[in-house]
Amino acid sequence: MNQVQRVAHRGGAQLAPENTLAAFRNALTLPVDAIELDVQLSRDGQLVVFHDNTLDRLTNGTGNILDVDFADLRSLNAAASFPGGWPQPEQIPTLAEVLALVKGRLRVYIEIKLSKRDGVYGRYPKIAEAVVREVWAAKMLSQVLFISFDWPVLTELRSIESDLQVGALVSHDLWTPKNEQSVRELCDEVLSRGCQWVSLDQRLFADPMVNLIHQRGLKLALWTVNKAADLERLARAGVDSLTTDRPDLFSYLS
Ligand code: G3P
Ligand code: CA
């Protein structure tokens, strides 16, 4: 079996409140190589680690992240909706806090999110520059893979700093697998964005894609794989990175 990178999705979203320091601390105790996290900007321009565009599902607050100042985000409990409850409140962390926690211990997959207001997607102003600056300040450029569904932001990242690892996230909305040619076309598009990685929704994956993607010189990541048998099978198929909400299951990988 190749050396697959084992990635804790949002720190391991089924084991602890997602994208909190509690989840990332827990990931440090598990057999993982990397954490995945999502970044957005507060109204006053602080880089925060949070998945949804609104606060409603995960916290005791409401409204859009982009309409709330950092101090107010910090007063919320990001563990409010954890299934089965959580013993204490958890704050929404900053990107800097998470980087400091895992520096020198785990790789970090930083997903740059689009903003959304009234159903309309947009890009957070200067988010690419802000994220690169933060990672650079933490001296962690070589530890980070930058990922996004917003492919133009990936091109922007590489133009800010050419020495970055960058991966294109691919969902059903962005690409439909039809045949070998469609996989090659996807690879060409991803390469034209300056990416080294293609990162697929696992439901789009079929085994022959491994060789096709490797032949193009790209690495292949899959998300989000939450069953032990699937992790094992996909690692054996030659996938380079597997992201899961259940990073404890990596202990079963031989
Ligand atoms: O790692 C990629 C994956 O996190 C993308 O989907 O919605 O969980 O951010 P999402
Ligand atoms: Ca994500």
Image (tube, helix red, strand yellow):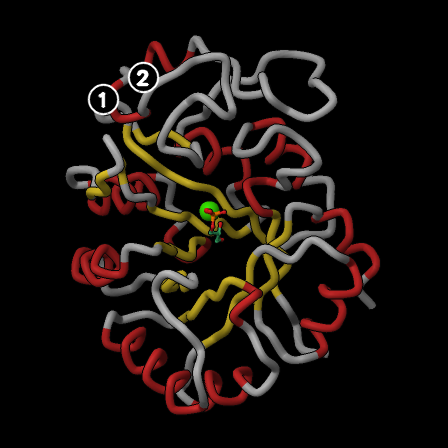
Q: Earlier in the sequence, mark 1 or mark 2?
A: 1
Q: Which mark is residue 43?
A: 1
Splitting the image into 4 quarters, where does residue 84 fall?
top right
On the image, the x and y values in percent for residue 112 come to: 34, 46
Q: Amino acid at mark 2?
A: Phe
Looking at the rendered image, the quarter that the C terminus falls into is bottom right
Q: Amino acid at mark 1?
A: Arg
In the picture of the structure, the residue carrying the numbered disc 2 is: 70
Looking at the rendered image, the quarter that the N terminus falls into is bottom right
Proximity of marks 1 and 2: CB atoms separated by less than 8 Å: yes
- As drawn, 173 above or below 195: above
- As drawn, 119 above or below 206: above
Splitting the image into 4 quarters, where does residue 241 fall?
bottom right
Question: Spatial distance from mark 1 to mark 2, Cα to Cα?
Answer: 7 Å
- As drawn, 98 above or below 81: below
Identity of the residue drawn at 24% across and 20% down: 67
| Residue 165 visible in image | no
- As drawn, 82 above or below 146: above
Identity of the residue drawn at 59% across and 12% down: 89
On the image, the x and y values in percent for residue 154 come to: 26, 59
In-image side of 29 versus 92 (left or right) = right
| Residue 209 visible in image | yes
Q: Which mark is residue 194?
A: none
